[in-house]
């Protein structure tokens, strides 16, 4: 039996999900990763119900749901500790049919790799697109070991994608979003805390528990691009956040400078003309880099991968029509999420004292009148479902998600509890 060949360039979350989904559809998949290993450096990822339902198609949704650590209250705070708004994990699960799950990226990578045959991921392998292919000619990928032919190439090579530039050289590419982010995963503080995100003047801090007892911490600040701390990033964070409410000082006292990741946030608010050309499909940050302010970057990459595999039958000798359908499905949705993330970033990173005071006052007032208002920002995002047939026969995760949907969702997209 002939298995069409697919080459995935980039072994991040989107690339590995695409590889696993295509393998499940009968494709012979090779993943090429420039880095020497698949060990993601200390960072977490938030998986909303939309990504969990996408992972149901790989039989991984329930594995992810079992890692949910957020229980009870959480919400938005000021640097002094005052609550701007509150919500709880149960409200999220009821409104969108599943919990919000934070986990270490390494955990998700291991789960995705487990869905691939041994040897399909080649690390330490830089790759370039030599020819995007045509309906009558395969695509060509150049590596240090030679040239690979493929019926399909998936470019999952990140925000600075070389393949995107090759396919669409006139596109301006990603732009600086105006702020820099720091991330770390550390042991939990001794004293318990409620999960929170804290908004200051041009600064953001988040402290979120993981199931394994550690804490995922992220921070952001309005800074010029390409900056670095004059001493180390821990000292920089102490200058920016050292006097904020607990557990921020405790976390900064415990973290080692080398455990802190720093990177500028870049986004693509100007859409590509398409997410494909020839036999090449772009997905994830390569197609639609977005600000992390709604936590949807990895989630949208996972959606991309599942929708792409849905359109690509194993007998697709010429995937051109399939890739056009992929673009038609994904470009409008992902650009909507890019724009919504950009609007959220602008609100979070306000720097003027009057503007910040007005924002905080509005959040407090509206939160009292309409509890769980913050969840409504995810309407149309977290309630997304994979294209049918969504769940393979016999997959326990799919059965769970369908049952959950039947309890909570209505055809008009609302929920059983209108107060939410």
Image (cartoon, grey):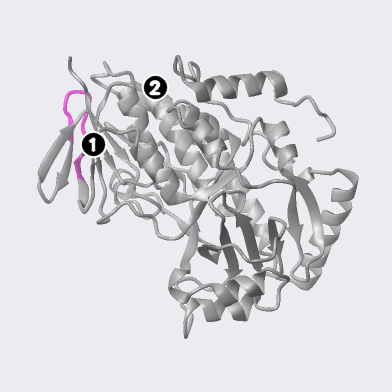
Residue bearing the label numbered 1: 118
- For the C terminus, which image quadrant? top right
Pointer 2: residues within 10 angstroms few (<14), some, or many (20+)? Answer: some
Residue 278 quadrant: top left
Q: Nearer the viewer, residue 199 or 64?
A: 64
Residue bearing the label numbered 2: 311
* Residue at the (64%, 73%) spot, across then down: 250
Instruction: Report the magenta residues as a range.
Output: 129-139
* Residue at the (68%, 60%) spot, across then down: 348
Q: Report if residue 313 is visible in the image.
A: yes
Q: Decide whether the magenta segment is chiefly helix, strand or loop.
A: loop
Q: Nearer the viewer, mark 2 or mark 1?
A: 1
Q: Is residue 132 magenta?
A: yes
Judged from the image, the secondary structure of the residue bearing numbered disc 2 is helix
Q: Is residue 319 magenta?
A: no
Report x, y in % for residue 322: 36, 22
Judged from the image, the secondary structure of the residue bearing numbered disc 1 is loop
Q: Is residue 4 left or right of residue 324?
A: left
Q: Which mark is residue 298?
A: none
* Residue at the (74%, 26%) spot, across then down: 414
Pointer 1: residues within 10 angstroms few (<14), some, or many (20+)? Answer: few
């Amino acid at each position: 039996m002939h298995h069409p060949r697919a080459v995935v360039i980039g072994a991040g979350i989107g690339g590995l999900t695409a590889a696993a989904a295509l393998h499940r559809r009968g494709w012979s998949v090779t993943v090429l990763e420039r880095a020497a290993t698949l060990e993601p450096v200390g960072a977490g990822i938030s998986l909303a119900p939309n990504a969990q339902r996408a992972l149901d198609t790989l039989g991984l949704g329930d594995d992810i749901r079992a890692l949910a650590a957020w229980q009870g209250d959480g919400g938005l705070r000021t640097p002094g500790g005052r609550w701007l708004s509150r919500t709880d994990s149960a409200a999220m699960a009821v409104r969108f049919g599943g919990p919000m799950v934070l986990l270490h990226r390494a955990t998700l990578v291991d789960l995705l790799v487990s869905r691939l045959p041994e040897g399909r991921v080649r690390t330490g392998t830089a790759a370039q697109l030599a020819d995007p292919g045509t309906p009558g000619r395969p695509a060509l990928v150049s590596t240090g070991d030679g040239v690979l032919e493929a019926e399909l190439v998936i470019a999952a090579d990140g925000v600075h994608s070389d393949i995107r530039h090759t396919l669409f050289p006139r596109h301006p590419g990603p732009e600086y979003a105006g702020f820099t982010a720091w991330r770390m995963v550390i042991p939990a503080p001794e004293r318990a805390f409620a999960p929170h995100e804290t908004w200051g003047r041009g600064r953001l801090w988040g402290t979120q528990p993981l199931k394994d007892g550690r804490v995922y911490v992220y921070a952001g600040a309005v800074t010029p691009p390409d900056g670095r701390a004059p001493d180390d990033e821990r000292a920089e964070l102490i200058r920016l956040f050292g006097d904020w409410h607990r557990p921020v000082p405790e976390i900064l006292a415990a973290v080692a400078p080398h455990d802190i990741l720093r990177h500028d946030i870049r986004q693509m608010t100007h859409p590509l003309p398409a997410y494909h050309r020839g036999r090449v499909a772009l997905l994830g940050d390569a197609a639609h880099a977005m600000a992390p302010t709604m936590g949807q970057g990895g989630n949208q990459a996972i959606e991309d991968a599942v929708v792409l595999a849905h359109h690509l039958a194993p007998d697709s000798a010429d995937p051109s029509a399939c890739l056009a359908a992929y673009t038609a499905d994904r470009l409008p949705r992902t650009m909507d999420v890019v724009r919504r993330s950009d609007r959220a970033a602008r609100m979070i990173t306000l720097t003027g004292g009057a503007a910040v005071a007005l924002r905080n006052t509005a959040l407090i007032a509206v939160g009292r009148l309409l509890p769980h208002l913050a969840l409504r920002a995810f309407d149309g995002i977290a309630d997304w479902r994979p294209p049918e047939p969504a769940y393979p026969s016999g997959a326990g995760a799919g059965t769970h998600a369908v049952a959950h949907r039947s309890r909570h969702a209505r055809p008009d997209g609302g929920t059983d509890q209108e107060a939410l």
